[in-house]
């Protein structure tokens, strides 16, 4: 049960996208995406390589300006605002591939996450909170972040996002390149952060199994369009999801072959 369910949230959206279209020059990456994230929920967007998942997150966080559509956060229009302003309002992104600052220490990476904040005492307390979730980061506090393992860098990237004191975290493929065991450990902490702090999460993942287990609500994105949305419990039972996202042994987790099969989303 997510923080939304625990808190008895009654369906108020913290984030809404309405008909959002974004492109890289001539390449249309998302084509009229509409979705809602309720306060305290974990919402996942599933999709294959290149479906446009990262583009959705980059458009929300202001890294990419959409060509069309509206993004509302806590009822206010944040479409195409400056990324720093969006962070200040409480939206923090954990980028794909972690992107820690390799030549800065672990602690300085965490401080970079708090660069928009003036409340130094609270920042110091939040560093302790991050170390509480990921004790290895305390042990490595003075080491260069570039020396951390992939899993530890992912922990640092999540902690750095936490340092902005966000109400909404945008998580881009936290499982990328990690072993199943580390992926489980990281997702356990993501769920704890959601439960303990009430932080809403929008998670994009290729690891559908993990995403559908931790999230409340899910969207399926294909070629830049939402083709299905439902509760994760319901999505897990759908034949197309089972076939194309879960347990297709012979095509591999990221296999392209299954994407060439005909799909009939329902
Ligand atoms: P992945 O899991 O591979 O990151 P994704 O679902 O996150 O996939 P996006 O990264 O959002 O997909 O990419 C959507 C489309 O936009 C793809 O066709 C991709 O090739 C294209 N694209 C992404 N980034 C750029 C860029 N910087 N310049 C040009 N095209 C891009």
Image (spheres, rainbow, N blue to C red):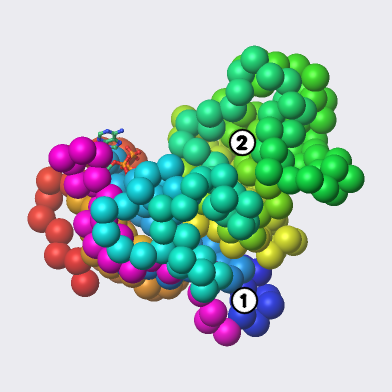
**Can see residue 249?**
no
What is the magenta range?
Answer: 10-33
Q: Is residue 81 above or below residue 42?
A: above
What main secondary structure does the magenta stretch of the protein show? Answer: strand
Locate the C terminus and report the quarter of the image it occupies: bottom left
**Can see residue 22?**
yes
Task: Looking at the picture, tell me which residue is in the foreground, 265 or 131.
Answer: 131
Q: Any mark on residue 5, and which? A: 1
Counting the numbered discs, the total is 2
Give coordinates of residue 264: x percent, y percent.
14, 65
- Location of mark 2 (residue): 157
Give coordinates of residue 78: x percent, y percent.
47, 60
Q: Residue at x 61, y 36 (%)?
A: 157
Left or right for 156, reference 220: right
Q: Residue at x 25, y 39 (%)?
A: 24
Q: Secondary structure at mark 1?
A: helix
Please say whether residue 81 is one of the residues in the magenta stretch.
Answer: no
Give coordinates of residue 69: x percent, y percent.
30, 63
């Amino acid at each position: 049960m997510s923080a939304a369910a625990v808190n008895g949230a009654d369906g108020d959206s913290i984030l809404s996208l309405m008909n959002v279209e974004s492109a890289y020059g001539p390449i249309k990456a998302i084509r009229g995406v509409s979705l809602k994230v309720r306060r305290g929920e974990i919402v996942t967007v599933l999709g294959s390589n290149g479906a446009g998942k990262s583009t959705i997150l980059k458009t929300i966080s202001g890294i990419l300006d959409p060509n069309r559509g509206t993004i509302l956060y806590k009822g206010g229009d944040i479409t195409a605002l400056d990324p720093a302003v969006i962070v200040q309002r409480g939206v923090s992104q954990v980028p794909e591939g972690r992107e820690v600052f390799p030549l800065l220490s672990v602690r300085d990476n965490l401080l970079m996450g708090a660069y928009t904040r003036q409340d130094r005492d609270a920042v110091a307390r939040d560093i302790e909170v991050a170390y509480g979730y990921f004790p290895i980061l305390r042990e490595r506090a003075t080491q260069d972040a570039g020396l951390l393992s992939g899993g530890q860098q992912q922990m640092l990237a999540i902690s750095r996002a936490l340092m902005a004191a966000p109400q909404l975290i945008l998580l881009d493929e936290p499982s990328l390149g990690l072993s199943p065991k580390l992926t489980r450990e990281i997702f356990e902490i993501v769920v704890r952060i959601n439960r303990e702090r009430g932080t809403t999460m929008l998670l994009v993942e290729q690891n559908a199994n993990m995403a559908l287990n931790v999230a409340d609500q899910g969207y399926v994105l294909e070629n830049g369009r939402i083709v299905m949305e439902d509760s994760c419990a319901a999505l897990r039972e759908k034949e197309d999801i089972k076939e194309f996202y879960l347990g297709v042994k012979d095509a591999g987790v990221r296999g392209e072959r299954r994407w060439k099969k005909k799909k009939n989303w329902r």
